Amino acid sequence: MFSIDMNCDLGESFGIYSIGMDEEVLKFVTSANIACGFHAGDPRTMRKTVQLCVQNKVAIGAHPGLQDLQGFGRRNIDITPEEAYELVLYQMGALRAFVKAEGGRLHHVKPHGALYNIAAKNRPLADAIAKAIYDFDNQLVLYGLSGSELVKAGEQIGLHCANEVFVDRTYQDDGTLTPRNEKNALIEDVNEATVQVLSMIQQQKVKTVLGKEIGIHVDTICVHGDGLKALTFVKMIRKKLQDEGIHIKSIK
């Protein structure tokens, strides 16, 4: 029987701005990646999201991003490996404070947006992120793009790594995600998304935007919490996976 983790990026509201349907989505996922204040989120949102995760028995993850609130952390910013180490360390520490206060446990770390995508290709940056996580707590799980330099860096330093794939994103021939500013980067049809995720889990293959089938390894699947159809996606995809005999549970 296949066993898979289902994660979602959450806690992205800040100030008077409300993003996503966190309370509802958390009923259907097994792990959550919580924004730590740099690309989204704020102290109140972080605390509330941690509380919801504890209540729903959802694994709690830090979701550190570039310091780019206006661009939602999705714009490329040229940072050094040393800066990457520091910003990841800082954000993990901020979230862990709330996790400890609420009686929870920090389970994993998943970089956000541009930081995630850059680290998928840039080994020095990937090494810096992996080192920050290892130095902070070497028992944390590192979530990274399946087969990426970030996963390789984490494995080399001794972290438990989870190869992540995306329900609602399309892929390039090299296994990277199609950039959001390109046509067909997002999958908005839940049936199309379901076909893709089942292929990735059951056949370990994904069809790229150019029609090529490439191999892919899956430990955890992601649905973006800021998507307009996020709740529909998590509900329907979870049900479909369970109908296929796939067990949904967090990574140990």
Image (spheres, rainbow, N blue to C red):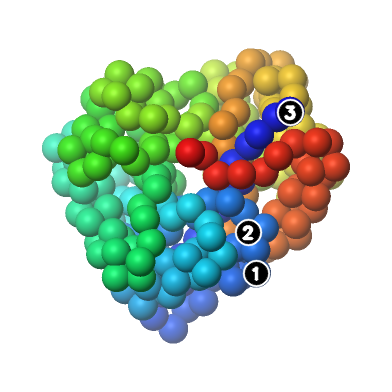
Q: Give percent across and percent down for residue 229.
A: 71, 60
Question: For mark 2, what is the residue?
Answer: 227
Q: Which class describes the residues within 10 Å of circle 3: few (<14), some (14-19), or many (20+)?
A: few
Which callout, 2 or 1, points to the residue nearer the camera? 1
Judge from the rendering whether residue 171 lies leftward or rightward of residue 122; answer left or right. right
Q: Which class describes the residues within 10 Å of circle 2: few (<14), some (14-19), or many (20+)?
A: some
Q: Give percent across and percent down for residue 171.
A: 62, 29
Q: What's the CA distance linking mark 3 and mark 2?
A: 30 Å
Quadrant in the rendering for residue 27: bottom right
Question: For mark 3, what is the residue?
Answer: 1
Which callout, 3 or 2, points to the residue nearer the camera? 3
Question: Type of residue at label 3?
Answer: Met
Q: Residue at x 47, y 78 (%)?
A: 17
Q: Secondary structure beneath disc 1? A: helix
Q: If you read the primary sequence from the N terminus, does the residue marked by circle 2 or circle 1 appear first?
A: 1
Judge from the rendering whether residue 217 lies leftward or rightward of residue 241; answer left or right. left
Number of marks: 3
Question: Type of residue at label 2?
Answer: Gly
Quadrant in the rendering for residue 71: bottom left
Q: Residue at x 36, y 77 (%)?
A: 44
Q: Secondary structure beneath disc 3? A: loop
Q: What's the CA distance linking mark 2 and mark 1?
A: 14 Å
Question: Type of residue at label 1?
Answer: Glu
Q: If you read the primary sequence from the N terminus, does the residue marked by circle 1 or circle 3 appear first?
A: 3
Question: For mark 1, what is the residue?
Answer: 24
Quadrant in the rendering for residue 135: top left
Q: Which class describes the residues within 10 Å of circle 1: few (<14), some (14-19), or many (20+)?
A: some
**Mark 3 and 2 residues: CB-CB less than 8 Å, in contact?**
no
Q: If you read the primary sequence from the N terminus, does the residue marked by circle 3 or circle 2 appear first?
A: 3
